[in-house]
Image (cartoon, rainbow, N blue to C red):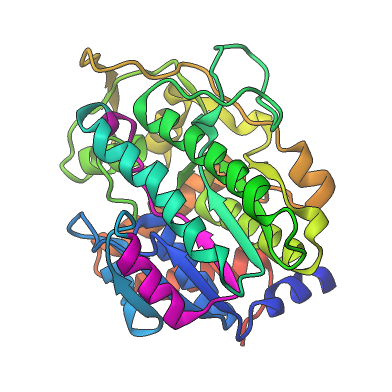
C-alpha cells in the first residue's frame, strides 16, 4: 500500500501533456490524472463518435484541452511550448485496423509523422519523461502459441499495426540520434493488450459491437470467433503507463519498451469473450458467427509482460470476468441515465484500493 500511495501522490501538481486525450483511453487517462491531482493538458482532434466518453464525463471542464491535428507540427509546437510540460504521454493515433485498410495514407501520416512531430517538440524542451503508447500488434505476428516479448521483431502486417511498428522505430531513432547524451529525459514505449472499458463507442471493436447489438436486442455478429487476443480493462494498462512514466522520471535506467498485458489465462478467444459478455449482460442475448469477408486480421496474439512485472513491479489486478463485469455495469448505468462519473470514480478507488479524499 505504501508504494501505491507514493506512486499516486507523485503526479500531484505535475504538468502532464497528453496527445489523443479526447479518445476512449485518453479520456480515462485524463480522468484518472485529474483525480490524482495532476495538471492535465491535452491535444487531440475533437471526439469522432456521438456519444463519446470525453463529453459524457465533462472532463474538459477540469483540464486544459486543445483541439488540433497531430500532423500539424507548427500548431502542436506552439501549444506545447506554451505549456512547457515535464511529462508527455503520446496516445494520438488512427487506432483501427479496418480503417487503416480504408485510408492507409491518413493512418501512416497520423501514426508515424505524429510521432515524429511530438518528438520534435520535446527535443528542445524541459520534458523529463516521455512515453509513446503503441499496441500489442507491433510484433511480426507468426501465429505461434506463445506470448511475444519486447525483443521480438517489430513488423505489423496491416497498415495500422505496421504504422505503430514504425512509430516504435521512430522513437528508437530519435532516442539514439538526439537524446542519448541527455541525462535529464527518459524515453519509453508501451505495448498494451486489447483494451476494454466503459465508454468505448468505437466502431469495429468487439465489445462496442456486442453492446450495440445487445441494446437493440439483436443477435451479436462475430467475425472471427476463434481469434485469441490479450483483453484487459483500461485501468490495467493506464496503471502500467503511469508507473513506467513515474519510475523513469526518477531513474532514467527504467526507460525502454514494455508490454502491459493480462495474465496468459485471460488471453481468450473471441468466442469465450462473447460468451462471457452474453452471460454478464443477460436478457437472453446470443451471438452467431458471421464472416463478412473483410481484410486480414491476425488469429493469435498474446503478450509476455514479465519485464513489466519484474522490473516495474506492475501486475494485472482484474481478470477478464471482472473486466467485463465493469464494462457491462458502466453501460447499464449509462443507458439508465444514472451517474457514470460516480461509477468511474468508484472503479478507480476499487482498482487502486485507495481513498483519494
Q: Which residue is nearer to you in this view: 295 or 207?
A: 295
Residue 156 versus residue 14 in the image, above or below: above
x, y percent for residue 199: 34, 57
Residue 270 versus residue 232 in the image, above or below: above
x, y percent for residue 191: 58, 41
Camera sees residue 76: yes
User: What residue sits 63% from the left and 54% below the top?
Assistant: 178
Report the label total.
0
Q: Which residue is nearer to you in this view: 86 or 322?
A: 86
Side of 75 where 261 appears, left or right: right
> In which quadrant will I find the C terminus?
bottom right
x, y percent for residue 234: 51, 52
Specify start and end residues of the magenta stretch as a single range: 73-100
**Magenta segment: does it hold 23?**
no
User: What residue sits 53% from the left and 18% below the top?
Assistant: 141
Residue 141 versus residue 330 in the image, above or below: above
Side of 60 where 127 appears, left or right: right
> In which quadrant will I find the N terminus?
bottom right
Side of 99 where 11 appears, left or right: right
**Magenta segment: does it hold 76?**
yes
Q: Which residue is nearer to you in this view: 148 or 338?
A: 148
Camera sees residue 198: no
User: What residue sits 20% from the left and 16% below the top?
Assistant: 292
User: What residue sits 71% from the left and 77% below the top?
Assistant: 10
In the rendered image, which quarter is residue 284 located in?
top left
In the rendered image, which quarter is residue 82 located in?
bottom left
x, y percent for residue 306: 77, 37
Side of 180 where 344 appears, left or right: left
Q: Which residue is nearer to you in this view: 151 or 149?
A: 151
Amino acid at each position: 500500500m505504501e508504494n501505491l500511495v507514493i506512486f499516486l501522490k507523485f503526479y500531484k501538481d505535475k504538468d502532464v501533456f497528453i496527445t489523443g486525450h479526447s479518445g476512449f483511453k485518453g479520456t480515462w487517462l485524463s480522468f484518472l490524472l485529474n483525480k490524482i491531482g495532476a495538471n492535465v493538458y491535452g491535444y487531440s482532434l475533437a471526439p469522432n463518435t456521438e456519444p463519446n466518453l470525453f463529453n459524457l464525463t465533462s472532463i474538459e471542464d477540469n483540464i486544459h484541452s486543445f483541439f488540433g491535428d497531430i500532423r500539424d507540427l507548427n500548431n502542436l509546437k506552439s501549444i506545447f511550448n506554451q505549456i512547457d510540460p515535464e511529462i508527455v504521454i503520446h496516445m494520438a493515433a488512427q487506432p483501427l485496423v479496418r480503417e487503416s485498410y480504408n485510408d492507409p495514407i491518413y493512418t501512416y501520416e497520423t501514426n508515424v509523422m505524429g510521432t515524429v512531430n511530438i518528438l520534435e517538440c520535446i527535443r528542445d524542451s524541459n520534458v523529463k519523461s516521455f512515453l509513446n503508447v503503441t499496441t500489442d500488434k507491433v510484433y511480426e505476428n507468426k501465429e505461434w502459441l506463445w506470448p511475444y516479448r519486447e525483443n521480438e521483431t517489430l513488423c505489423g502486417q496491416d497498415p495500422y499495426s505496421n504504422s505503430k511498428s514504425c512509430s516504435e522505430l521512430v522513437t528508437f531513432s530519435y532516442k539514439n540520434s538526439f537524446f542519448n547524451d541527455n541525462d535529464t529525459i527518459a524515453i519509453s514505449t508501451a505495448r498494451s493488450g486489447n483494451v476494454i472499458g466503459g465508454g468505448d463507442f468505437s466502431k469495429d471493436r468487439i465489445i462496442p459491437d456486442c453492446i450495440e447489438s445487445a441494446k437493440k436486442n439483436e443477435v451479436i455478429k462475430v467475425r472471427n470467433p476463434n481469434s485469441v487476443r490479450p483483453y484487459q480493462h483500461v485501468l490495467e494498462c493506464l496503471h502500467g503507463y503511469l508507473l513506467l512514466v513515474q519510475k523513469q522520471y526518477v531513474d532514467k535506467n527504467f526507460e525502454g519498451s514494455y508490454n502491459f498485458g493480462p495474465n496468459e489465462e485471460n488471453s481468450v478467444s473471441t468466442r469465450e469473450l462473447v460468451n462471457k459478455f452474453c452471460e454478464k449482460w443477460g436478457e437472453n442475448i446470443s451471438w452467431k458467427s458471421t464472416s463478412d469477408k473483410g481484410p486480414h486480421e491476425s488469429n493469435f496474439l498474446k503478450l509476455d509482460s514479465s519485464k513489466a512485472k519484474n522490473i516495474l513491479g506492475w501486475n494485472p489486478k482484474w481478470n477478464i470476468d471482472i473486466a467485463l463485469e465493469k464494462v457491462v455495469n458502466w453501460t447499464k448505468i449509462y443507458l439508465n441515465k444514472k451517474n457514470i462519473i460516480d461509477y468511474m470514480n468508484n472503479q478507480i478507488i476499487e482498482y487502486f484500493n485507495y481513498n483519494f479524499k
